[in-house]
Amino acid sequence: MPEHGGNLRDAMRQYGRSDWIDLSAGLNPAWYPAPPLADNAWHRLPEPDPALTDAACGYYGAPQMLAVAGTQAAIQALPRLRAPSRVAIAAPSYAEHAHHWSKHGHTATQVPYADLASAVDACDVLVVCNPNNPTGATVPRAQLLAWAETLAARGGWLVVDEAFADVDGVHSVTDHAHMPGLIVLRSVGKFFGLAGIRLGFVATHPALLHALDELLGPWQISGPAQQIGKAALLDRAWQRATRDRLLRDGSRLSALLAAHGIAAAGTALFQWWPEREPERFHDHMARRGLWVRLFRAGPRGIRIGLPPDEAAWARLHQALNEWTKESR
């Protein structure tokens, strides 16, 4: 299984400390405050709530959506809905895409972002994270829509993972997900900081949504997750304030890294850079109780999410100061 962030039990086991600041998963550290649950939330079978999908369509601007148990559920299921195909996956990106498309008889090839345009003519399915995880790279909206049209003309798919698109959705194509062959994945976990409720959405044309729903089966989303997710998706005041805060904090993190000679790129929720000695940097931070995301393969590097409070910002600043001195 691919490695992921948020694995604090591994950190505790490896380093023998419990006072961790988790910067590894790229989640909003000020999560949405879950409302009180209905008395029967844990009692009833979780039948789908149309009001949840209505709230999602309103928030994301999609014509139609299916709620899934985190976009991971869709990432694992979509390859099972096609005959063996030639699949091009933007690289580097979220490793689960390549992992699952390489199964079920597909031929999966990882393609650098610079070569994606040329890959469209040689594949049946193109998978792009936009913004990309972990680098923050983006593909312009107009380019994505053109690729979707090209692929759909021969029965192909464009899968766009927009898990980190909530803060700046200028390149989002969710509103065009009625187009044949365009599939968009959206996550509640990142922007809302609610990764633990396992809730995401898929936007695509109705026939494919129905096939995906049938494959995933009944009771996909727990009742409590539906209640919390609906409240978060409808809370426009919280969303506006959170976008403003994340933009400020994202700029602050970028500036902090630059002050220590690190040329990073990313989104409002994380920064990433290719690191000459990523294992040594990761170990340096871990010994100071800062758990960052280590990328050992491909363009080896480090991803850091936002600190949750001023004490954590100070701890990160101190650790970077010590790293800079040690690396001179």
Image: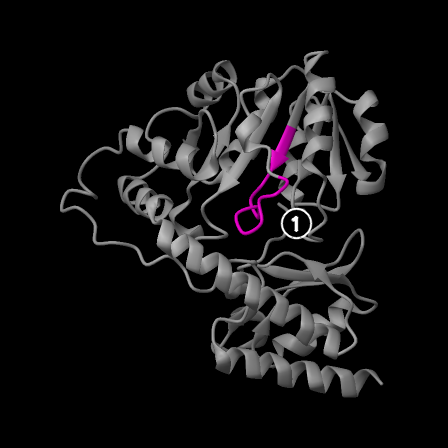
Q: Which residue is mark 1?
A: 133
Tell me residue 88's x, y (percent).
76, 30
Describe the element under mark 1 as helix, strand or loop.
loop
Name which residue lies at 27% across and 29% down. Answer: 47
| Residue 113 vertical position relative to residue 50 in the rendered view, above or below | below
Q: Is residue 60 above or below residue 273?
A: above
Taking the spot 54% from the left edge, 52% from the top edge, the residue there is 167
Query: What's under tag 1, amino acid-wise?
Result: Asn
Left/right placement of residue 151 relative to residue 167 reads right
* In the image, residue 93 lies in the stretch drawn in magenta: no
Residue name at image x 60 percent, y 53 percent: 4
* Neighbour tally class for label 1: few under 14, some 14-19, many 20 plus, Cα within 10 Å: many
Part of the protein shown in magenta:
159-171
Residue 193 shown left or right of residue 292 in the figure? left
Q: Evaluate whether residue 48 shows in this view.
A: no
Horizontal and vertical percent position of residue 145:
68, 27
Q: Is residue 166 magenta?
A: yes
Query: Which image quarter holds the N terminus?
Result: top right
